[in-house]
Image: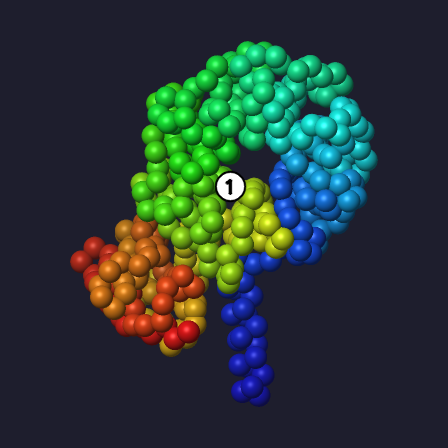
């Protein structure tokens, strides 16, 4: 009977913590994911030479939905249509990928990016600038202007503005793509790789220069590299005030528009090369090179902790991590009797700060944070919790 109870508790624990780290989202095995899009609760993933896949249950199951053995370079969707830039051109679906119509034929152009603005469709190319349709893809025209000959790796519609990330920096159009002008003040002649927006803030990830922010339509860019050791930004996504980037060291999160960055690689083991993100259905999905699709709870990855009990404890407490010793991950549980700013920091044996696990306001309750020591050597570590006048520190041991 005791063994049965223990087994049930283990199963329940595993279930409640399964989203507290990156997990494989069961995508096409071994595939390289190049792009994502979503329509309602359906998430689409474009692959390198394996076609297009979709899931309606957040990655529990995926099914092929066209372009078998083709590469899907880019995706974009609106209320009525889904567009795909593929090996043979641009295709459109009006029924969530069940059927496709080729709306632009070309086997010589790579359509690296797509964006939609009402009935306007924009396709960024590999050295031919931007292709535009004004009638939802029925007819197309190349825009021969400042973007001609550039590689347009990312397109973004933000209000009345359209931005293009190119190997010549960032360009802006205010007339639905008819004309474009460079908006690179502060970018230092960097090649722009990926764009994202949140409210008035526009973010750009660059090739070797890190990540930048602008709040005035791309003018006066400010660098946000504090704490980042690799400045080749491969993927970028934003959710309200939370910014996610991927570089060769994995996934990093900033909650304060780039003032600090926190590693969010828990669950990966060997950190994959990440090509693209999408935030959908309260998850963040990561498309990788040769490791298909990974998924993590958006709420959990932002907070870095899991609220395991809302019962208000009587006192503050910081509990011993478990397992201890550990290799390479461990759990740190703490309880707070009142709302306040919580900071949980890990230090090495010499007192040097290793990682900030929590630095935010939290409601009263009991929480659990995870520390992943994959990137650190074996040895003694200390974790320190502060909240108001309360301070507590405990020792832990990592043995690899």
In the picture, the quarter occupied by the C terminus is bottom left
Q: Secondary structure at mark 1?
A: strand
Q: Nearer the viewer, residue 90 or 258?
A: 90
- Occupied quadrant, residue 343: bottom left
Residue 142 in percent (x, y) is at 66, 15
Eyeballing the image, is 115 above or below 309? above
Residue 381: % across, % down: 29, 69
Colour scheme of the picture: rainbow
Label tally: 1
- The residue shown at (43%, 64%) is 374
Q: Is residue 338 left or right of residue 25?
A: left
x, y (%) of residue 298? 50, 49
Q: Position of residue 351 (x, y in %)?
A: 22, 63
Number of other residues with Cα within 10 Å of mark 1, as a class: few under 14, some 14 to 19, many 20 or more: many
Q: Nearer the viewer, residue 182 or 332?
A: 182
Tell me if 297 is positioned left or right of 104 in this view.
left
| Quarter of the image where one finds residue 368 | bottom left
Residue where numbered disc 1 is placed = 235
* Quadrant in which the N terminus appears: bottom right
């Amino acid at each position: 009977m005791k063994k049965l109870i223990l087994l049930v508790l283990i199963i329940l624990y595993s279930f409640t913590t399964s989203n507290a780290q990156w997990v494989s989202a069961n995508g096409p095995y071994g595939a390289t994911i190049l792009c994502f899009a979503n329509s309602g609760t359906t998430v689409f993933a474009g692959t390198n030479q394996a076609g297009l896949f979709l899931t309606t249950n957040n990655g529990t199951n995926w099914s092929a939905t066209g372009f078998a053995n083709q590469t899907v370079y880019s995706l974009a969707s609106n209320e009525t249509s889904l567009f795909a830039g593929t090996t043979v051109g641009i295709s459109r679906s009006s029924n969530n990928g069940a059927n496709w119509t080729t709306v632009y034929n070309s086997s010589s152009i790579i359509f690296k990016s797509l964006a939609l603005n009402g009935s306007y469709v924009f396709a960024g190319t590999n050295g031919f600038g931007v292709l535009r349709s004004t009638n939802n893809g029925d007819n197309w025209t190349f825009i021969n202007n400042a973007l001609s000959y550039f590689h347009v790796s990312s397109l973004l519609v933000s209000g009345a503005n359209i931005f293009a990330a190119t190997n010549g920096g960032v360009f802006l159009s205010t007339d639905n793509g008819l004309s474009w002008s460079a908006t690179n003040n502060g970018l230092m002649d960097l090649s722009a790789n990926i764009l994202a927006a949140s409210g008035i803030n526009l973010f750009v990830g660059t090739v070797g220069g890190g990540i930048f922010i602008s709040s005035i339509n791309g003018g006066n860019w400010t660098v946000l590299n504090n704490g980042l050791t690799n400045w080749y930004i491969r993927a970028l996504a934003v959710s309200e005030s939370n910014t996610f980037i991927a570089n060769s060291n994995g996934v990093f999160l900033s909650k304060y528009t780039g003032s600090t960055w926190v590693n969010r690689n828990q669950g990966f083991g060997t950190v994959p090369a990440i090509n693209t993100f999408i935030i959908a259905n309260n998850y963040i999905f990561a498309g990788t090179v040769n490791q298909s699709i990974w998924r993590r709870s958006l709420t959990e990855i932002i907070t870095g902790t899991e609220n395991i009990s809302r019962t208000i404890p009587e006192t503050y407490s910081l509990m011993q991590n478990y397992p201890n010793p550990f290799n390479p991950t461990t759990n740190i549980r703490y309880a707070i009797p009142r709302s306040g700013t919580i900071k949980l920091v890990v230090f090495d044996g010499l007192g040097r700060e290793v990682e900030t696990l929590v630095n935010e306001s939290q409601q009263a309750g009991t929480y659990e944070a995870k520390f992943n020591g994959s990137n650190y050597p074996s040895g003694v570590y200390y974790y320190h919790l502060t909240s108001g006048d309360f301070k507590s520190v405990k020792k832990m041991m990592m043995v690899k």
